[in-house]
Each structure stands twice: as C-alpha cells, then as structure tokens.
Image (cartoon, rainbow, N blue to C red):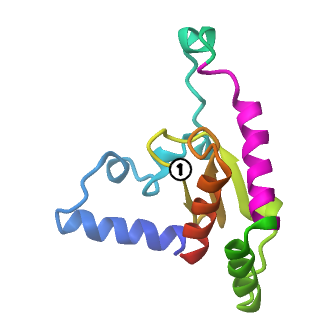
Amino acid sequence: MTVENEKADEGKRNENGAGGGAAADNGDLWGSDMYPERRGAKLKRNWWKWLIGAQGRESIDKNKCEDNVYRCIKKSPIIKLMMGALKSSGCEIDIRRHISCEVCNPIVTGGYDSEFNQIVVCQNSASSESMVRGVLLHEMIH
C-alpha cells in the first residue's frame, strides 16, 4: 500500500466515523506513533531510568537485535523458507536495506513500514532470537 493510498483509506475511515485517533487528526501515517524515531522524533531521555540502567543502552540493544536477525536468517528453517518464497516471487530481501532494528513503543515488537519498504524489529521489545524470528515470520507473511 502506498502512502497516498494509506492517507486516502484513512480519510474514508474518518468520513465513516471510525478510527478518529490522534494519527488521523494530524495527517500522519497510521501506526507511526509506534515507531517514533522513523518520523524524526527524538527518544525522550529520563535521567532516573538512565541512572538505574533501564535506559542508555540503545547501541547495545541494536547490536544484539541485529545479531539475532542475522542468526535467524542464517539458521531458522522457516525464515529461510519465507525468504526463498519471496525471492521466487521477485521480492529478494537485502538484509541491510529491508530489515531495521529500532527503538519502538514498548507495546509492539515489530512491524512493517510500507513507506520505506522495511521490516522494523523493535530492539527494546524483541530481545530474544525467538521473538525476532516471530517478528520476521509475521511480517514476511504480509
């Protein structure tokens, strides 16, 4: 779905009275509040969380996430199967281009960004290899 189609679809939902959320009010893409850094928002820092070690480890989490993605792509039979199926359909996946580890809203573990044509793996939520595998599989099915 293209950006224009998403905005048009969003407008139709608003005309019907459904889905009058904050994203619909300011013209943003649906779900962009789940991945704030993708749209230019800065990560809010909290000195207390930093002090107790709950924040300030984004680079460590990103490296761990990217390592989990790489291991899933190399070792997981189901991910290999999905990548092969996508490739045979003409949708070859370049790991560096089509998969991104980012800080997200804590209630999601990943998603798909149709504007950038990327699978987003939430480095702060999908912390294990099995969770990353689940995110990759779910988004590749779409």
| Residue 10 appears left or right of 52 | left
Image x and y of residue 6, in percent:
44, 68
Residue 8: quadrant of the picture: bottom left
User: Label 1's element?
Assistant: loop
Residue sitting at x 48%, y 48%: 108
Residue drawn where x is 68% and y is 79% of the image: 82
Q: For residue 67: magenta?
A: yes
Corner quadrant of residue 104: top right
Q: Is 76 left or right of 26, judged from the image as shown?
A: right
x and y, in percent, of residue 88 in the image: 75, 91
Residue 109 position in % (x across, y down)? 53, 50
**Amino acid marked by disc 1:** Thr
- Residue 18 in the image: above or below residue 34: below
Q: Residue placed at 68% from the left, 21% from the top?
A: 56
Q: Which residue is mark 1?
A: 109
| In-front residue for pair 92/73 | 73
x%, y% of residue 95?
A: 80, 63
Which residue shows up at 82% across the image and 59% down it? 96
Residue 14, picture quadrant:
bottom left
The quadrant of the picture occupied by the C terminus is: bottom right
Residue 11 or residue 43, whichever sits in front: 43
69 falls in the magenta region: yes
How many labels were placed on the picture? 1
Vertical comparison of 100 with 134: above or below: above
Predominant secondary structure, magenta span = helix
User: Which region of the structure is painted magenta?
Assistant: 54-74
- Residue nearest the viewer, comparing 65 with 95: 65
